[in-house]
Image (cartoon, rainbow, N blue to C red):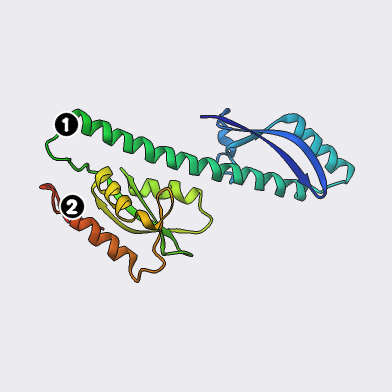
């Protein structure tokens, strides 16, 4: 879903107010798809105003480039986080709908992965999520993280296992799917043991944790 942002650009003490930037409304050119700032688009009149400032010597081209790149990066990070939350929500809703259609006597596991990730800088602040393909989800998460992310643990179990772990560690929840394990010696072991204990009640349980 496209979104328009209105920002005030400050370049070397000069202010350009009410600049319109769009995300997702226009498919960017394939020529520049590999550029770090690819995604947001800026209105042409604002670009002309920036060029006028450069031409007059009020700001340098490098100063203008740095400001535009910073604004574009912030928009990309914001949309990446929103996309990740939406993706998790859609997968969870799909799992719930599938369970309702089957109406099993006993809740059934699905084959998706429950994963635990953290940044290299903060290994005890952990995200517990669910995904069909962990590798793809890691790439999506990395887009919105300045620090390299590390996959700490994963196991099949889908929405049911994810919900069980979220409920079990609710007191450690920071926000959304992120949990604080700073006072736990080995957070991954604690999560793995909680998951295995839960999964043993299911006939299809197979200890294929990675």
Q: Which residue is mark 2?
A: 199
Q: Position of residue 117 (x, y in %)?
A: 38, 56
Q: How many marks?
A: 2
Residue 177 seen anywhere in this rendered image of the structure: yes
Q: CA distance from mark 2 to mark 1?
A: 19 Å
Quadrant of residue 15 within the rendered picture? top right
User: Residue at point 66% right, 48% down?
Assistant: 70
- Label 1 CA crowd tier, 10 Å (few <14, some 14–19, many 20+): few
Label ID, residue 155 = none
Extreme bottom residue here?
185
Marks 2 and 1, the one that precedes in the sequence: 1
Q: Which residue is mark 1?
A: 103
| Residue 37 in view in this figure | no
Residue sitting nearer the eye, 113 or 135? 113
**Residue 12: image x %, image y %?**
81, 50
Spot occupied by residue 185 in the image (x, y as percentages of width and height): 35, 71
For image coordinates 16% across by 31% down, the residue present is 103
């Amino acid at each position: 879903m496209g979104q328009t942002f209105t920002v005030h650009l400050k370049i070397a003490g000069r202010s350009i107010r009410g600049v319109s930037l769009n995300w997702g409304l226009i498919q960017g050119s394939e020529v520049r798809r590999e550029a770090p700032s690819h995604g947001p688009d800026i209105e042409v009149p604002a670009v002309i105003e920036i060029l006028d400032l450069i031409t007059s010597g009020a700001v340098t081209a490098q100063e203008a480039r740095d400001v535009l790149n910073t604004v574009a990066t912030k928009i990309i990070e914001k949309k990446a986080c929103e996309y990740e939350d939406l993706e998790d929500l859609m997968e969870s809703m799909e799992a719930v709908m599938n369970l309702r259609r089957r109406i099993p006597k006993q809740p059934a596991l699905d084959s998706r992965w429950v994963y635990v990730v953290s940044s290299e800088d903060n290994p005890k602040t952990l995200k517990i999520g669910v995904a069909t393909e962990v590798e793809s989800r890691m790439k999506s998460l990395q887009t919105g993280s300045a620090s390299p992310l590390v996959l700490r643990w994963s196991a099949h179990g889908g929405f049911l296992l994810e919900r069980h772990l979220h409920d079990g560690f609710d007191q450690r929840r920071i926000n959304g799917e992120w949990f604080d394990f700073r006072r736990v010696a080995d957070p991954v072991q604690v999560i793995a043991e909680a998951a295995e204990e839960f999964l043993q009640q299911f006939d299809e349980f197979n200890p294929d944790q990675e």
